[in-house]
Amino acid sequence: MTETDKSARGATATSGVDNETSDKEAAVLATIARMAGPDRAIAARIHAIVKASVPALAPRLWYGIPGYAINGKVVCFFQEAESETRYATFGFTDAANLDDGAMWPVTFALTELTAADEERIGALVKRACAEFTAAERTAIAEHVEGLKMAARRGFPQAQAPGEADVLEKIAAMAESDRAIAERIHAVVAATLSPKLWYGMPAYAKDDTVVCFFQSAERFKMRYATLGFNDCANLDDGTFWPTGFALTTVTDHDEANISELMQRAIG
């Protein structure tokens, strides 16, 4: 094979990759174009911000919504407001390097995009795509090992049928998820009514689910998630956290969760 042949073959392969990338981005843009007006405007701006912040992030559809991936792994995504929700969501998967202690926000509500919001999103995307340092990888591994060794906590006898279902679901979880879920339950069940929601432990006020716990094992993620529905009164401007990653629950985290609950139902 001549050098000319090799160059031509390489150019053809590169062209094929470029075409595939273009097709995936075209599918994302077509999905954005079909959104309702307010969400379409937000999604289009987020698309531009994500690509400008980290050009290596490749647009692709992920479960039917716009996602942005590196090395085939989706790092962040945009979900338009549905008929039951009052805001759109910009979120990060567990491939994002946003770790901050044992509890940090991973999904954010959006009602519009201000200049400050755009700057914050750009900074989050850049952080999310930063490489983990050796120390961070070691810390994550130690967290996981520590959770595996954590002693299981006990519960008092449940009184309500909904709580019995929730406790049964928690008891069936892997040990690391169970330890987190038990502490969250102890904090939240004092204020809200436990019930299962899409098979997950959830907590309701007047039968409307305010928050829920998603185990790491459920979607094979490296952290569990405490999430809030749009009935939660956590609004803070036009861009605020609605979901939090959890690798464990410290006393400080318990205090934060308790404060979030008071705000959510206030």
Image: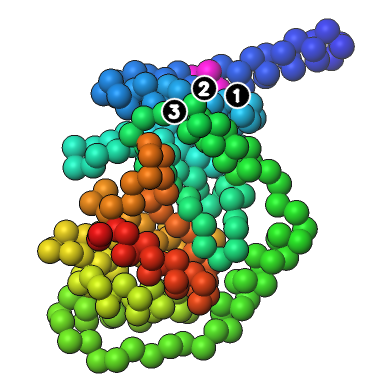
Residue to which mark 2 is pinned:
48
The alpha-carbon separation of the residues under discs 3 and 1 comes to 17 Å
Residue to which mark 3 is pinned:
114
- Amino acid on which disc 3 is placed: Thr
- Amino acid on which disc 2 is placed: Ala
Which residue occupies 25% across, 60% down? 265
Q: Is residue 154 magenta?
A: no
Whether residue 25 sits left or right of residue 149 in the image: it is left
- Residue 115: x percent and y percent? 49, 26
Could you say whether the residue bearing mark 3 is in a helix, strand or loop? loop
Please tell me whether residue 102 is drawn above or below residue 111 in the rendered image. Answer: below
Whether residue 102 sits left or right of residue 165 in the image: it is right
| Quarter the C terminus occupies | bottom left
Q: Which mark is residue 213?
A: none
Whichever of callouts 3 and 1 sits on the residue coming sooner in the sequence is 1
Nearest the viewer among 223 and 26 is 223
Most extreme residue toward the top, as rendered?
4
Could you say whether the residue bearing mark 1 is in a helix, strand or loop? helix
